[in-house]
Amino acid sequence: MEIIDMRPKLSKNRGEVCYPFMYEKSLKCDFEILTDDLCRQVGAILAVMPPEFPVLIAELEKLQPMIYHLNGSIRGKCAVSEEDVVWLRELYLGHRAATEESVSGSVAGFVLPRGGAPVPQLNAGSSAAKRAIRLMVRLYDEENVEIPEVLHRFANVLCNYLFVLTLVVNRARGEVEVPFVSQSYPERKSRVRRNES
């Protein structure tokens, strides 16, 4: 009896192939798909970012191609630089300082994710950055793939940056952040501000 190989594989018809690594077992493909989605999300954020935020638009326009550099930096040559991390971190710290009072009434800076567009899109992008970090952790733990430290740092700052932009936009609109106090964890006074989510 002939055994038929039913494993999914690339079609020989180029029009039926969306990505050449789609059927590999490695999580590298999952990382690349996720960071591709994250880059597309930044494009969506730019599409709905109101024109009264020209500084944020300029920042996001510069940031977007960096996410595609993140995308290819595990399978290919690392294309995220220390300068990229420093640039993004400085933007984040500047926005964080400007919005500190927005979260001053909440424990450790936790606020409920609320606000009109582009806030939901920014929150979704921030969450996608977290998933990219977790995939890098899994690539190392499960596949022994060496991940350049700069990629972890960039993705963490990216997550924080996209979150803090939600505060920037809400503050400019006069919206008050709604604090969230967890009943699962005790309050820790020395905790670093989180939900830089």
Image (cartoon, rainbow, N blue to C red):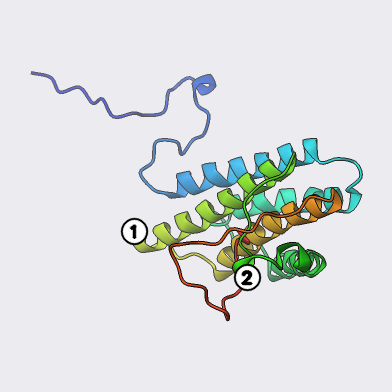
Task: Tell me if 40 is positioned left or right of 191 in this view.
Answer: right
Can I make out residue 104 in this image? yes
Task: Tell me if 130 is positioned left or right of 82 in this view.
Answer: left
Nearer the observer, 166 or 4: 166
Position above or below: 98 against 126: below
**Quarter of image, res 185:** bottom left
Q: Which residue is mark 1?
A: 142
> How far across and down, in percent of the image, does residue 67 sit?
66, 51
Q: Which residue is mark 2?
A: 193
Say which quadrant the N terminus sits in.
top left
The residue at 13%/19% (across/down) is 2
Q: Which amino acid, by three-letter code, is at mark 1?
A: Glu
In primary-sequence order, the first of circles 2 and 1 is 1
The residue at 57%/50% (across/down) is 127
Q: Residue furthest bottom?
A: 190
> How far across and down, in percent of the image, does residue 43 sit?
73, 39
